[in-house]
Image: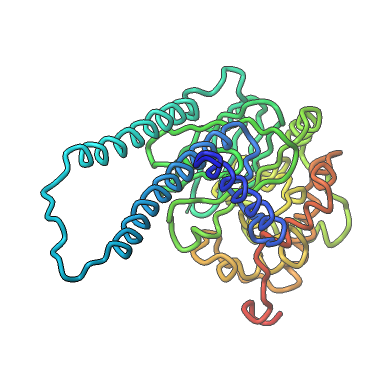
Amino acid sequence: MTRGLKLVGLLVWLSTMISYAQEQLPFLNQPNVLNGASPNAREVEGLFWWVIGLSVLVLLVVVAFLGAAIVRGIQERNLTDEPPQIHGNLALEVTWTAVPLLILAFLLVLTVGSIYRLSGFAAPEEALEVNVWGQQFWWEFQYPENGVVTANELVVPVGRPVKLNLRSRDVMHSFWMPQFAGKTDLVPGNNRAQWFTPEQEGLYYGQCAELCGDSHANMRLRIVALAPEEYAQWVEAANTPAQVSSEQLVQQGSQLFISKGCVNCHAVQGVNVYNRVGPDLSHIGSRTSIGAGILANNHDNMVRWLRYTDVVKPGVRMPNLGLNQEEAEAISTYLSELTLPNVDIAAFIGEDKLQQTNEENTITLQAHVLGGN
Ligand code: CUA
């Protein structure tokens, strides 16, 4: 067997082991660069394998020479004679300078090509543009083409390129969707961009990848990739105010949302669309997560979030409003009714998939941390 075949065998073995580990170890299903879901991510993955492959090749060659030298040294061991004295070897020195140079030059050409193709400026004309604003510690998504504003869950249609214009409202953040594209920093005062084409429907994960404060690790996001017809339904629903019921608890929550001041920072279509210090909550009831991807969206989590925001997410900008349990439950009930009219995101994604990914990727709140309510 030639050395090349062995290398291929090693790579096949490595990737088999990685996919086996992915099945066996749930935490590996978290954002992962080796299971790309867009051509852009696979381009990055391709670079990764070139680097790994060449590194393994260099390792094998070096270890082979080292092994040969050791074996020969042992076989020809002669403790009485002085070994031959050598003063350099021009051919050898030229070779071990030229070969690494050629390898690095080859990687440079590959990398520069990829950087060019993956940059936001290379996004196709027909791309859906989304303006992404990063701030401590959440993401805003504005769709100029559709007139939609949402937060923390980027909804995109499968098969169409998406161009993200990335900007920061405070400090540096980094937008990272491992399965779709590489990281791009959001630099205050700068416009950056990246693009990707989602290929398969589903729920994907992202994460801020630049240390940006106390809750940097809690600045996550989700990407909801929908079939084109489902995406069209989502756009229509996202432009329609939610219809809340006249049930007493819901109405009480709606009143508290205003009297407690939530409305001063959060926009809700039909209530107040201008205040956007915090995430737009027009259809918060239809999101899969709360707190920028850290908690599964359910009643208990929402109540805890409303009462103990700063415990769940240290450094959060949302003040503690001193809500009691009853008030928090009323507001949570109201928010749960702010849903997309006639669109069931959970059904689009698949309830099983949603539940599984929530188990694997969200924080489990411990009652004792939260004052034992
Ligand atoms: Cu934003 Cu780290």
Q: In which quarter of the image is the C terminus?
A: bottom right
Name the spot of residue 211 as percent of width and height, x first: 43, 56
Q: Which residue is drawn at 56% across and 65% down?
A: 313
Residue 328: x %, y % from top left:
72, 67
In this rendering, the answer to whether 343 lies above or below 68 is above
Quarter placement of the N terminus:
top right
> 85 and 209: which one is in front?
85
The one nearer the camera, 145 or 108, is 108
Q: Which quarter of the figure has residue 95?
A: top left
Direction top: furthest residue? 125
Q: Can residue 19 be seen in this view?
A: yes
**Quarter of the view holding residue 141:** top right
Q: Which residue is drawn at 28% across and 62% down?
A: 76
Question: Residue 294 placed where, x, y %?
Answer: 63, 59
Q: Residue at x 43, y 30 (%)?
A: 110
In this view, 229 is above or below 271: above
Seen in the image, is 279 located left or right of residue 187? right
The part of the image, by quadrant, that contains residue 75 is bottom left
- In the image, residue 368 sits, relative to residue 331, either above or below, namely below
Horizontal placement of 60 versus 238: left or right? Answer: left
Residue 320, above or below 10: below
Q: Is residue 275 visible?
A: no
The residue located at (64%, 54%) in the rendering is 17
Q: Position of residue 249 (x, y in %)?
A: 83, 62
